[in-house]
Amino acid sequence: MSKISTFKLEGLVAATFTPFDEDGNIAFSKFEDYCEHLVRNDVNQVYVNGTTGEGMSLTLEERKQVVEKWIEIGKNRLKKIVVQVGALNLHDSLEMVHHAVGAGADAIATVPSLFFRPTSIDSLVEYCKKIAAAAPELPFYYYHLPSVTGVELNMEDFMRAAVHEIPSLVGIKFSSKDLVDMIGILNIPAPHRADGKLNVVFGCDEQLMAAMTLGADGSVGSTCNFMAAVYHRMFGFTSNFNLVEARKEQYRSQQLCRIMYRYGSLWGNNVAALKYLMAMAGPNMGPPRPPMRKATLAEFNQFKSEISDLGFFDWLK
Amino acid sequence: MSKISTFKLEGLVAATFTPFDEDGNIAFSKFEDYCEHLVRNDVNQVYVNGTTGEGMSLTLEERKQVVEKWIEIGKNRLKKIVVQVGALNLHDSLEMVHHAVGAGADAIATVPSLFFRPTSIDSLVEYCKKIAAAAPELPFYYYHLPSVTGVELNMEDFMRAAVHEIPSLVGIKFSSKDLVDMIGILNIPAPHRADGKLNVVFGCDEQLMAAMTLGADGSVGSTCNFMAAVYHRMFGFTSNFNLVEARKEQYRSQQLCRIMYRYGSLWGNNVAALKYLMAMAGPNMGPPRPPMRKATLAEFNQFKSEISDLGFFDWLK
Amino acid sequence: MSKISTFKLEGLVAATFTPFDEDGNIAFSKFEDYCEHLVRNDVNQVYVNGTTGEGMSLTLEERKQVVEKWIEIGKNRLKKIVVQVGALNLHDSLEMVHHAVGAGADAIATVPSLFFRPTSIDSLVEYCKKIAAAAPELPFYYYHLPSVTGVELNMEDFMRAAVHEIPSLVGIKFSSKDLVDMIGILNIPAPHRADGKLNVVFGCDEQLMAAMTLGADGSVGSTCNFMAAVYHRMFGFTSNFNLVEARKEQYRSQQLCRIMYRYGSLWGNNVAALKYLMAMAGPNMGPPRPPMRKATLAEFNQFKSEISDLGFFDWLK
Amino acid sequence: MSKISTFKLEGLVAATFTPFDEDGNIAFSKFEDYCEHLVRNDVNQVYVNGTTGEGMSLTLEERKQVVEKWIEIGKNRLKKIVVQVGALNLHDSLEMVHHAVGAGADAIATVPSLFFRPTSIDSLVEYCKKIAAAAPELPFYYYHLPSVTGVELNMEDFMRAAVHEIPSLVGIKFSSKDLVDMIGILNIPAPHRADGKLNVVFGCDEQLMAAMTLGADGSVGSTCNFMAAVYHRMFGFTSNFNLVEARKEQYRSQQLCRIMYRYGSLWGNNVAALKYLMAMAGPNMGPPRPPMRKATLAEFNQFKSEISDLGFFDWLK
């Protein structure tokens, strides 16, 4: 069976950070440790150049280098490497697709164009079709991130149309809290898929348990970079129908995210706070790029103190 | 133990319709049948004068009559009668509270003031405190309906503050898809409650399964008026950890709601479509009040045909 | 010619405050002074029970009393008394219309229903038609206040349709910054009007000069309650094509409004801040009703100091 | 005096289109005619690679070529060439700035970063400071386009802070209908400017008259590409205090824009409709790039017919 028929993201997929040095240049020397850290925490699938990876703050050249590095390092250690190819416009995205194919990515995902945005189901289908068609052998995912892209179309309607128009459509990274919309997608017939279903991976870690219960296949998240143990336990409890204990793990994640968003908002975006959390629990990813900024020492200490009071460092044991 | 310590809504609570005759007057003769229909479908708790009941399209006098009718008819047949007392402003809401107390309601719930809206956690707490204080013996619920009221404050923050300020606070009717916010509420310590927890009832039928899995106690919904069987089955499957079958019931609800919203939008509000669904599956509730309008015959036939194609009439067996 | 053909609001119309005593009851004894203050400042038209008047925080009984009081006191001193009859729903609004007719109002205006909102041009026309028809002899105005009512329909489309459906339609109180929409309304043919045009009064004092230049007939505003002098000068300069000086007056208004909104947001709504400004420059209107709150002493002093630094007290000379 | 002290856009500035051939490649052969058309219509200032120019649909390489072409062709014919350097992120924008300096642009303007957006006044100031600092000799404009960029910060607050932090700050292209905010900017002291004021150019053609009356210096617009005559007349009437006639010209523009937006929405963005208007009144700019699409023949005929009925072709005489 073809890759498109059977490709499936399941369980935890890390939306990877891009490590920078203090000058804001990509710190290629850090990828090795980072990959090791993920594997040690039983995270074997990655989603590269997405939001967490500040893909949109990199030049196209840099994005290519990041992809190449992940493939070089992850080839024999990771099970799946998905490359986010979405960019400001179609031309730039196509350049990313062609590179992903050549570099050996396992699958691609894309946001819609970010300035002139698709404003109808039809135009979004047309847009994605052009991108997917540039890599017909690679599994294609739509990256639904309405709070950032401003493309707030109904995804059930979109996927129902897209499944007929885009032969390589495998699924969606669904980064919205609107589970009603997700329920619809889970029930779309996908005749070109071995199991007849689209592959749905959820992007809001702080309500992941709900998405999984409804039938999502896994999570493409940022917090599993530094607290995979919490989610592994949550999945375990859910499998054993121990909802009471599973909820406790989900609540940990929810509490952490609330603090993370509060500080992230202070520093320009939640990725800034996520990078500090990563440094506390694993390899240091360096500062974020503008328009995000570094924390002041006082802010950082306060942040760390709140995180610590939550019990964060105990959760990781 | 006091009522406030132990009062709890669980499972299905019907947000009741208000039946009208063709002239738009309240059809008091229809309450008997309606109540019978609910009980026959194993729905024994009601939420009166909320959105589904067009409470905000009634005069205060009419609202009182509706409350009295429900208490007269439901006294020995229903387990719990909750009265929504929220109105345009504080003065009108207080009038509704005093009436609810005298009439013998089991609990009250309120939306915030609808023109001058509370704009901070503090002002919302103060506002609710005034309403709850007018009926200190009655369990108090906040009715969170941000898409209509425009009060989009964080409910976890609100409930954390309110639990200290409002002695009769029992819980929340949570009519938002933002489950992250709901997770927080489920974990707020409530020392004045027998089980130490707030009572959370969910208001979006089309993703109810997700809310229940996360720990919500029940549903205050409109669609259980005419398809309680679907939710009873869903709850049963979930209790038996048969998620696959439970999801099928949830998907039925989600499909129905999509059609219902589409036609509701045509007729001015989804309540208009809900009333037609009720008439198809139970007693006729009559037309909605303006600004909603009746369907044309062609629209109605098209609506019924879509609902029927979905299998709606088979679900009810 | 009929009143509907010739009725026209022009220049300054005060959206009146409702004076309260310290307990929040209507202070009827203050109306006399208040009316005197307006007339002394050459403001001879009033708009009663609108936003500034906290009409939506009054019971229907109280609203009637306020209307009667204004008509009693203003009969021989004011040129025009417009009554805002909009309420939570159609039934309550109709009660207000009937009262306005009996009490002798000169014209009526209405917001749309506030909970179940008209969601299409058609439903808004139907809704207004029902209200206007209850007082066919009274000039009818639609009160466009999208930021509060949530009814964000295109007003040009609405008025183009309404002019054919509502025989008593005279004009619109346009409380939105969207001047593009207003330009359209100014150009709608109104054959039932003596001058062939709809009467457009603007509701955003802080950009009033722009609206007047484009052709608006006047202003229904709150700040002319306490700084009519500024607008009288602005109108004077504009008439003499002295745009440079006119802009200075508009800038004064804009600066004041910025401070007013900032403090209003602290106190629950800008009406709270407006009432303090009124007390500084004229008769004391008392505190606002909940969910607004009073200023603390420190807040009030800070507010007064900022207003004073702006030169507010010099502008009034 | 330095260029930054005296540089000023006044009157009409064309936000230029980028001409494409049928394959979507830049049609360099069309620039000559296009420039000629503008000059013939007395439009001598251009704003390159903005929204109208689909700058965000071009690759960085293409953007550079467009800049070079405009400077080559316009050097001796145009008075001012402003280059929009904003891009997806800081790195890409800096590349555009360096190119603009080398190519000989007269001034630069920038939108904020488009994926990770500045979320506070401070971060927006910091972001712009980095861009302006890369071309300290070039007049710097902020391009305020909140409906597209999602950066909805108060511009008065921003400009008050920026004027102290960015030595080359000359002004703002203000593409929002919020004239209250613009009034504030017009009154910010700018000690480094010869006239002590910031240069404000307005971006909503359909309410330009209002902005000019309040003191804006000119317009950076799209519709002056094909109907400059309307605005020249409008300016003339305004100068002569003939507001009645000036309003007629503004109304023409407003009517046209309403139709243009309606069709633009059908075709993916208003630029698609603008390009057709341009082709009707001047040189053909070719189709837009995806996600916009071409009109069908029936759509185009309908569009042209509506435009023609409006009198468009007569206005241009």
Image: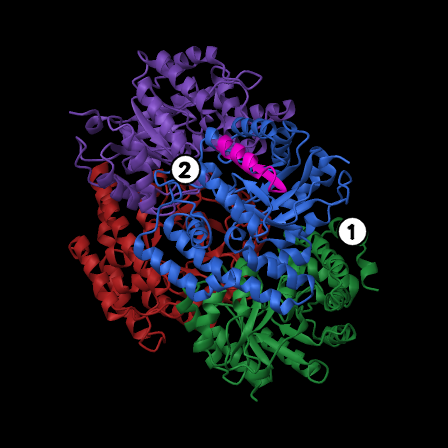
Chain colours: A green, B blue, C purple, D red
Q: Quadrant of the C terminus of chain C?
A: top left
Residue C80: within the magenta?
A: no
Disc 1 and disc 2 on one polypeptide chain? no
Q: Are marks 1 and 2 in contact (CB under 8 Å)?
A: no
Magenta stretch, residue numbers = B63-84
The relative height of residue A244 versus residue C125 in the rendered view (above or below) is below
Q: In the rendered image, which residue does mark 1 sit on? A: A301
Crowding near pointer 2: few (<14 within 10 Å), some, many (20+)?
Answer: many
Q: Which of the two residues, D82 or B138, is positioned nearer the viewer here?
A: B138
Q: Chain of mark 2?
A: C
Question: Residue shown at 65%/81% (left/top)?
Answer: A71
The relative height of residue D182 versus residue D51 in the rendered view (above or below) is above
A256 left or right, relative to A198: right
Q: Residue furthest bottom?
A: A1
Is any part of residue B16 visible from this angle?
Answer: no
D212 left or right, relative to D171: left
Q: Which of the two residues, C116 or D68, is positioned nearer the viewer here?
A: C116
Q: In the rendered image, which residue does mark 2 sit on? A: C113
The residue tagged with tag 2: helix, strand or loop?
Answer: loop
Judged by depth in the image, the label closer to the viewer, 1 or 2, is 2
Q: Position of residue A280 (x, y in %)?
A: 78, 61
Q: Amino acid at mark 2?
A: Ser
Distance of label 1 from label 2 (alpha carbons): 51 Å
Q: Position of residue D34 (x, y in %)?
A: 27, 66
Q: Position of residue C251 (x, y in %)?
A: 43, 33
Question: Residue shown at 29%/71% (left/top)?
Answer: D286
Crowding near pointer 1: few (<14 within 10 Å), some, many (20+)?
Answer: few
Residue B73: within the magenta?
A: yes
